[in-house]
């Protein structure tokens, strides 16, 4: 059964789309409607959502900005964009952010239902359940890993520094990286085969093959990744940014890497039933640095021993102290613990000072901690016991309840003061949190 989120600032359109989908026989379990991007983000944080249908032109936060934030929260959620304007620029940005379709208002009901049906089919692809993974997966995934001379060139780039920048460029061209870069990052996917004791050596080989193909299909034309099979079933991916894409200051590159890492982990677990760890390098310009990036991704994965609950590891999140011989190593337990505490304390302080700010985002908080959103979420949960956004909601609800009980402020004024765009949305979250509505609380307090 599917769960859909409809986002449109025109209530009649939201209700109309909800009625159309509810009666379409698509196996829809829940339909949530939000009147703006801020409300939509709360639904994404608090509810399971398979598909988001969002308008582009909304006040406060438009559909493109919403898609940016949604991909940080749940990068695997499918999106269909609707717009009153047939604007190529918006359509291009929406597709670049992974939109399944871009539809123009007034909407054609049949076209919308076809688009929704296709998106839901994409979201529910079943995991392979038969031992013969090659047979069950081969029809869906097209292997793109280089072989022969391209593979040897790629192995040389990843394993050792090139004699010169010119030589690195020649190897990159031979490895199939001509249309990738000039900015690069390396991602390593480490399947946790120990979690699947039922697998034979052949099954493990086939699953590693499936991980490689799933990864290349998932990132697709948007990233044009170059994959390589590594020892012990590990998979390497090289992704790149053109000069134009890298210069786009509206998109955080760390957020993009974070989104890719979490999406790779989620899809391997969901579609292959294979837990996997993901190590991500920083970004460097030029293929001559690929061997350093590959080493960063490998070393990022070493932190899995210190953080067994984490699944995605970005090299830049961790402190590296100089050791003898100029190498780098992980800091000691005491130093690492102190660093973690500083990150969480800064985040707590920032949230407590800004929880009433409309549109507060995980990206904003993680920037203050100088870490990726994924790492901050992990540390925050580990140290406080709260999901980061659960903590924001806790502060908002406690302050909202206090204001309702101790002041004569109206509901819309209370909602405004604790960071909500609309009193209706505040009331929904309040009732979900406490089990009773603001009006019920007021009535009970006045009756005493």
Image (spheres, grey):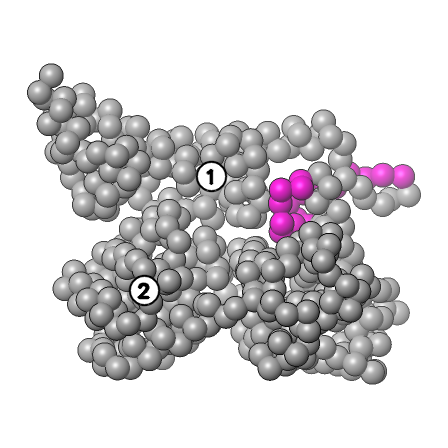
Q: Disc number at residue 50?
A: none
Q: Residues within 10 Å of mark 1 (few under 14, many from 20)?
A: some
Instruction: Classify residue 58 by image quadrant.
Output: bottom left
Label 1, label 2: how many angstroms apart (C-alpha)? 28 Å
Tell me which corner region of the image, top left, top right, bottom left or bottom right, holds residue 379. Answer: top right
Label 2 residue SS: strand
For disc 2, the neighbor class at 10 Å (few under 14, some 14 to 19, many from 20) is some
Of residue 408 and residue 432, the one placed in the foreground of this image is 432
Q: Is residue 311 magenta?
A: yes
Q: Quadrant of the C terminus?
A: top left
Residue 296's spot in the image, x, y percent?
A: 74, 54
**Disc 1 or disc 2, which is closer to the eye?**
2
Q: How many marks?
A: 2
Residue under pointer 2 = 28
Q: Residue furthest top?
A: 448
Q: Residue drawn at (72%, 77%), measured in percent from left and top?
A: 145
Can I make out residue 13 in this image? no
Q: Residue at x 35, y 37 (%)?
A: 393
Q: Please give the residue where the numbered disc 1 appears in the rendered image.
A: 387
Q: Closer to the N terminus: mark 1 or mark 2?
A: 2
Is 142 placed left or right of 104 in the picture? right
x then y, percent, for residue 325: 91, 43
Residue 371, given in percent of the width and then of the height, sits at: 58, 44
Quick one: quadrant of the N terminus? bottom left
- The outermost residue toward the right is 325
- Residue 318: within the magenta? yes
**Residue at the image point whose x is 21% and y is 60% from the top:** 9
Under tag 1, what secondary structure? loop
Residue at horizontal 46%, vertical 72%?
122
Is residue 7 at least partly visible in the picture?
yes
**Magenta stretch, residue numbers:** 307-324
């Amino acid at each position: 059964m599917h769960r859909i989120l409809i986002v449109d600032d025109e209530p009649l359109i939201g209700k109309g789309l909800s009625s159309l989908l509810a009666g379409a026989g698509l196996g829809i379990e829940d339909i949530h409607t939000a009147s703006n991007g801020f409300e939509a983000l709360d639904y994404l944080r608090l509810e399971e959502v398979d598909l988001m249908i969002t308008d582009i032109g909304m006040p406060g936060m438009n559909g493109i900005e919403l898609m940016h934030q949604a991909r940080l929260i749940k990068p695997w959620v499918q999106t269909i964009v609707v717009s009153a304007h047939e604007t190529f620029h918006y359509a291009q940005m929406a597709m670049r952010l992974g939109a399944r379709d871009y539809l123009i208002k007034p909407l054609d009901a049949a076209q919308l239902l076809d688009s929704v049906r296709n998106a839901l089919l994409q979201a529910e692809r079943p995991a392979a359940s038969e031992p013969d993974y090659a047979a069950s997966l081969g029809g869906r995934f097209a292997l793109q890993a280089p072989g022969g001379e391209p593979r040897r060139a790629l192995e040389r780039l990843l394993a050792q520094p090139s004699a010169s920048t010119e030589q690195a460029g020649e190897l990159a061209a031979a490895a199939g990286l001509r249309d990738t870069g000039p900015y690069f990052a390396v991602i390593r996917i480490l399947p946790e085969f120990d979690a699947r004791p039922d697998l034979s050596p052949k099954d493990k080989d086939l699953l590693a093959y499936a991980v490689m193909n799933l990864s290349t299909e998932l990132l697709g034309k948007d990233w044009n990744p170059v994959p390589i099979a590594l020892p012990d079933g590990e998979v390497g991916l090289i992704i790149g940014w053109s000069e134009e894409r890298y210069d786009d200051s509206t998109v955080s590159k760390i957020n993009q890497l974070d989104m890719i890492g979490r999406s790779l982990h989620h899809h391997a677990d969901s579609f292959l039933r294979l837990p996997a760890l993901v190590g991500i390098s920083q970004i460097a310009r030029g293929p001559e640095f690929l061997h350093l990036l590959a080493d960063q991704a490998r070393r990022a994965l070493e932190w899995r021993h210190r953080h067994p609950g984490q699944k995605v590891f970005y090299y830049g999140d961790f402190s590296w102290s100089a050791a003898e011989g100029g190498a780098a190593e992980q800091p000691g337990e005491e130093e690492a613990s102190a660093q973690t505490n500083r990150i969480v304390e800064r985040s707590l302080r920032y949230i407590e000072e800004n929880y009433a700010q409309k549109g507060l985002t995980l990206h904003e908080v993680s920037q203050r901690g100088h870490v990726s959103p994924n790492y901050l979420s992990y540390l925050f949960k580990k140290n406080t016991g709260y999901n980061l956004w659960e903590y924001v909601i806790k502060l908002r609800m406690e302050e909202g309840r206090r204001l309702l009980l101790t002041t004569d402020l109206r509901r819309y004024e209370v909602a405004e003061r604790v960071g909500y765009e609309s009193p209706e949305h505040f009331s929904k979250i309040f009732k979900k949190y406490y089990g009773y509505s603001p009006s019920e609380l007021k009535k009970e307090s006045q009756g005493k």
